[in-house]
Structures are given as C-alpha cells and as structure tokens.
Amino acid sequence: MITLWNLFIYNPIYNALILFVDVMPNFSIFISVILVTIIVKLILYPLSYKSIKTQLQTKALQPELNRIKKTITDKQEQAKKILEIYKEKGINPFSSFLLMLVQFPIIIALYFVFRDIGEGINTEILYSFIKIPETINMLTFGFDLTEKSLVLAFLTGFTQYIYLSISATMKKDPDDENKSEPEKMMAMVGQSMKYTMPVMITVFSYIVGGAVALYWVTSNVFMIFQEMYIQKKMKQEKTKA
C-alpha cells in the first residue's frame, strides 16, 4: 500500500514541485505550488465535470423525484424507482463522492511533500530527468510557506465561501416549495454549511501551514472558474440539443 502511495501520488507530486522550482525565477516554491495545483486540478477535471454535470442533472429531475417520494410510500420501492430513473438518464449519483475520495489522499500527500521539501531535497526519489535546483526559496511575496499564515488561511476560507455560494446558486432546487419537512431540514443544513465550512477550512489551513493553504486557495479559485465554465458549456449543449 505504501509503495502504491509513493509510486502514484507522493513521488509524482514531489518531483513535479522540484522540477518547477528549478525553472522558476529565484527558485520560488510559491509559484511552483500554484503550478502543481493547476496540474492536479486539470488531471481531475474529467471527474469534476462529471460531478457537476450529475448535480445539474439531478437538479433538473428534482420535481419528478419529489413526486415519486410523495406517491410511493414504501422506501424500498422509492429507492428502486429513483435508481431506475438515474440509470435511464445515465446519472451516477456517486460521482461527487468519487471526486472527494480521490482528492483526499492528494491533499494528504501535498502536506507531507511540502513538509519534507522544507527539510531538504530527497535525491533518492527524484526521477532521472529531474535537475536538483541550486536552492529552494521558501519566502516569496512576503509568504514563508514553511510557516503558518493567517493571510493565506483567510484567503482559503474566503475563496471557499465564494465557491460554495456560486455552486449553491447555480444548483438551487427549482422544486423547493414541494419538499418534505425532512428534506427542508437537510436543505437548511446544507445552507448553513456554506458558512461553517469556510470557517473550518480557515482554521485547518492555518494549522497545516502556508504551503497547503496556498494549494487550497489556488484550488478554490480554479474551481470557481471551472464551475462557471462547465455551467456555460452545459447550457450551450442543452441549447444545441
């Protein structure tokens, strides 16, 4: 398990970061972290696209799903009918969970990569074509990525709030009035998470340090534009259809 972790997650991220540091002006790890983050998000784009598409498709089906929940009282029959509709429409309800599952080990790997690089370059795990930089400049634009940063932690929470706000607005359920009381309660919980999640992420980002916080800020900004792009793209596809 550890070998697979190193082979497919830790080592590639480590080498990519060292590669970018070597070609960056002043050997800046700050810009290198941003570039690595963008590459990771581009690799995950197909999963992100599928996740957002699924959420929008589910939103469009919500009135029909609500009617099923009202007309069919048996829970097993309800679930069976809903799964049939998902299958008919080609919707995978677990795509969002899969995206979260993939991103979690990447965030853990990034934390350890940043921590280990701060202690010195491990030449034993470098690929043969990776050149060892003369130095690694941890201080850029006034940010020392080896230390905790209140500014980066705040930006993490702020950008997370913007992303959640945009996502919630675009995916608002058109059939809110016909929801049952438990569903309305769940919707309220989801709405409150728009405020509590950024606060929790701000605290977490401060605790784990500046490098991971910078990754999270860059990731959030990327997702904001990604969400808007996918929304626009799907609307165009719907219009053409």
Image: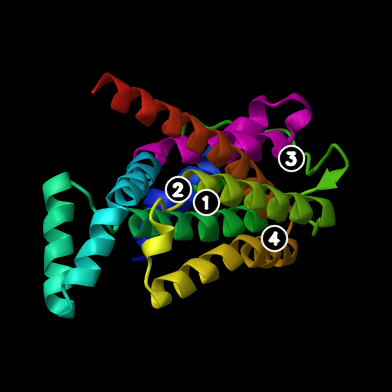
- Residue range highlighted in magenta: 17-46
Quick check: can you spot residue 127? no
Q: Vertically, is 208 above or below 121?
A: below
Under mark 4, the amino acid is: Ser
Q: Dots 1 and 2: beta carbons under 8 Å?
A: yes
The answer to whether any part of residue 113 appears in the image is: yes
Q: Residue under label 3, please give it.
A: 136
Residue 140 or residue 124, whichever sits in front: 140
Residue at the farthest bottom position: 74
Label 3 SS: loop
- Packing grade of label 4 (10 A; few <14, some 14-19, many >=20) is many
Are the two marked residues, 2 and 4, in contact with CB atoms closer than 8 angstroms? no
How far apart, in angstroms, are the residues tagged by discs 1 and 4? 23 Å
Q: In which quarter of the view is residue 81 placed?
A: bottom left
Q: Which mark is residue 168?
A: 1
Circle count: 4
Please tell me which residue is depicted at 18% across the width and 70% down the height of the picture: 71
Neighbourhood count class around disc 2 (C-alpha, 10 Å): few under 14, some 14–19, many 20 upward: some
Residue tagged 2:
171
CB atoms of marks 3 and 4 within 8 Å: no
Q: In the rendering, which numbered label is found on residue 16?
A: none
Nearer the camera: disc 3 or disc 1: 1
Magenta span: helix, strand or loop, mainly?
helix
Q: Which mark is residue 205?
A: 4
Residue type at mark 2 is Lys
Give the mark nearest the N terminus, 2 or 3: 3
Amino acid beneath label 1: Ala
Q: CA distance from mark 2 to mark 3?
A: 43 Å
Q: Position of residue 208 (x, y in %)?
A: 69, 63
